[in-house]
Image (cartoon, rainbow, N blue to C red):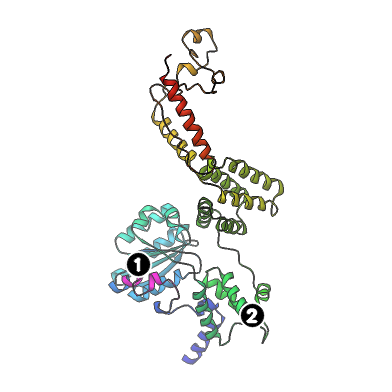
């Protein structure tokens, strides 16, 4: 009878996905995440201490969060309980907590693994705090989203956040070799196709093993696929990217900083990556317009109208033709001289405007549309700049109570070199006129 059960278990295992059959049995078998599981890794130190604290495992899909949580429980002798925030509610949580309390009375500690913990709302997340504080459970939450945005500060203060990395090509190669050893046959791919398989996996180990199964299922005996053949038999995976979440913010930040850093090649890469992932091109156009003002400004005054023109070109042409206009202005902005002088000057002016109250502008520059206002001195003494030889009167325009302010400091790059010369000229004239007798 025992032999019969063993045969049935083997049959069930043979029907399960390859990722399940290759799931590591110990932490030593886990591929990747050396910063956590290496000899000096964070988790190794926890295990050595014999005490496991609550954790948030943050990383892309298919990086081993569930596997690591289960093996951690085994390593420290804790009871493992798993729930998913997608399918669980308050009643489920209460049941799990009661079970954990009962087990605790028997001397058994519980590691509660919560998959996709970010999907619990704020009130549900708060529900974990009492059982974490009194030691009823050790919480290990898994999330693909940035915990800073998705999890309560109170929950984060009671758990250590550990970042899991996508698998590198050499780590995916190790998984592929384990799959070949388990199945007793080599992947029917040439070297280029094998590398292409890892590219399609996009750092997701579970997805890569799924692709391995697809390849074996779709190929004939003695058939070896090249890269083109591989793409015909497997479904191309879309890049991991959520337009409303972490991937979105990471990539737009990368695009902005590469433009600011004057690297057109890197900027084109991130622009293309976002477009391939389905980002709204008009969102990208708006961000490019912002970059033109924030990071280039008066160093190249043509940057802003060209960025606006690129947006208009996309609206006129649509995809894919209009995307070339976005690429063109991306290169233009990346190669333009950089200055944030206007950006910082405006921020400084805003600060002064908010803190200075509402001082009256000089009477000389106020219009006098009525006889009463004219009699009160509105506009009295105003000098029309065009009537002066230099086209510059040198009058004081700041409120008297505020005094003269200096916000805009042009850099010595691009067109702002010329702007600096003009400002120096006006400042000399202002000083000269202010010293002349009235």
Relative image position of residue 361 (x, y in whole percent): 45, 21
Query: Residue under circle 2?
Result: 217
Range of residues picked out in magenta: 31-45
* Quadrant in which residue 71 is drawn: bottom left
Task: Say what secondary structure mark 1 lies in.
Answer: helix
Q: CA distance from mark 1 to mark 2?
A: 43 Å
Whether residue 157 is in magenta: the answer is no
Q: Which sits in the foreground, 163 or 74?
A: 163
In this view, 291 is above or below 204? above
Pointer 1 or 2: first along the chain: 1
In this view, 196 is above or below 396? below
Query: Residue under circle 1?
Result: 100
Q: Residue at x 36, y 67 (%)?
A: 99
Relative image position of residue 21 (x, y in whole percent): 51, 80
Q: Residue at x 41, y 31 (%)?
A: 352
In this view, 78 is above or below 123? below
Relative image position of residue 203 (x, y in whole percent): 52, 69
Relative image position of residue 300 (x, y in whole percent): 56, 42
Q: Which sits in the foreground, 409 or 56?
A: 409
Q: Which sits in the foreground, 9 or 41?
A: 41
């Amino acid at each position: 009878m025992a032999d019969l059960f063993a045969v049935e278990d083997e049959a069930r295992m043979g029907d399960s996905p390859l990722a399940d059959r290759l799931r590591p049995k110990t932490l030593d078998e886990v591929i990747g995440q050396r910063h956590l599981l290496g000899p000096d890794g964070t988790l190794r130190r926890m295990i050595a201490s014999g005490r496991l604290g609550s954790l948030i495992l943050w990383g892309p899909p298919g990086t081993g969060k569930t596997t690591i949580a289960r093996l951690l429980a085994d390593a420290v002798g804790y009871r493992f309980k798993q729930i998913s925030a997608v399918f669980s509610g308050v009643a489920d949580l209460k049941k799990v907590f009661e079970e954990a309390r009962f087990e605790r009375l028997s001397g058994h500690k519980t590691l509660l693994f919560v998959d996709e913990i970010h999907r619990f709302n704020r009130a549900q997340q708060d529900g974990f705090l009492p059982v974490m504080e009194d030691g009823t459970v050790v919480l290990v939450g898994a999330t693909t989203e940035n915990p800073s945005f998705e999890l309560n500060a109170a929950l984060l203060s009671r758990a250590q956040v550990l970042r899991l990395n996508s698998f590198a090509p050499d780590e995916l190669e190790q998984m592929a070799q384990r799959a070949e050893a388990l199945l007793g046959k080599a992947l029917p791919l040439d070297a280029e196709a094998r590398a292409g398989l890892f590219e399609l996996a996009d750092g997701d180990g579970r997805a890569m093993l799924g692709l391995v199964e697809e390849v074996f299922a779709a190929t004939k005996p003695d058939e070896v696929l090249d890269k083109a053949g591989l793409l015909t038999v497997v479904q191309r995976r879309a890049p991991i990217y959520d337009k409303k979440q972490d991937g979105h913010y990471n990539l737009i930040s990368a695009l902005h900083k590469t433009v600011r850093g004057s690297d057109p090649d890197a900027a084109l890469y991130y622009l293309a990556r976002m477009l391939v992932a389905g980002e709204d091109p008009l969102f990208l156009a708006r961000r490019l317009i912002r970059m033109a003002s924030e990071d280039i400004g008066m160093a190249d005054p043509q940057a802003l109208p060209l960025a606006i023109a690129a947006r208009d070109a996309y609206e006129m042409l649509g995809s894919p033709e209009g995307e070339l206009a976005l690429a063109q202005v991306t290169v233009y902005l990346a190669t333009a001289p950089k200055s944030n002088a206007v950006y910082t000057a405006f921020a400084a002016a805003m600060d002064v405007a908010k803190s200075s109250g509402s001082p009256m502008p000089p009477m000389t520059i106020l219009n006098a549309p009525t006889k009463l206002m004219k009699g009160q001195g509105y506009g009295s003494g105003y000098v029309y700049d065009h009537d002066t030889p230099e086209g510059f009167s040198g009058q004081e325009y700041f409120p008297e109570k505020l005094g003269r302010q200096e916000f805009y400091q042009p850099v010595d790059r691009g067109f702002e070199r010329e702007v600096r010369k003009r400002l120096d000229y006006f400042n000399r004239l202002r000083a000269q006129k202010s010293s002349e007798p009235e």
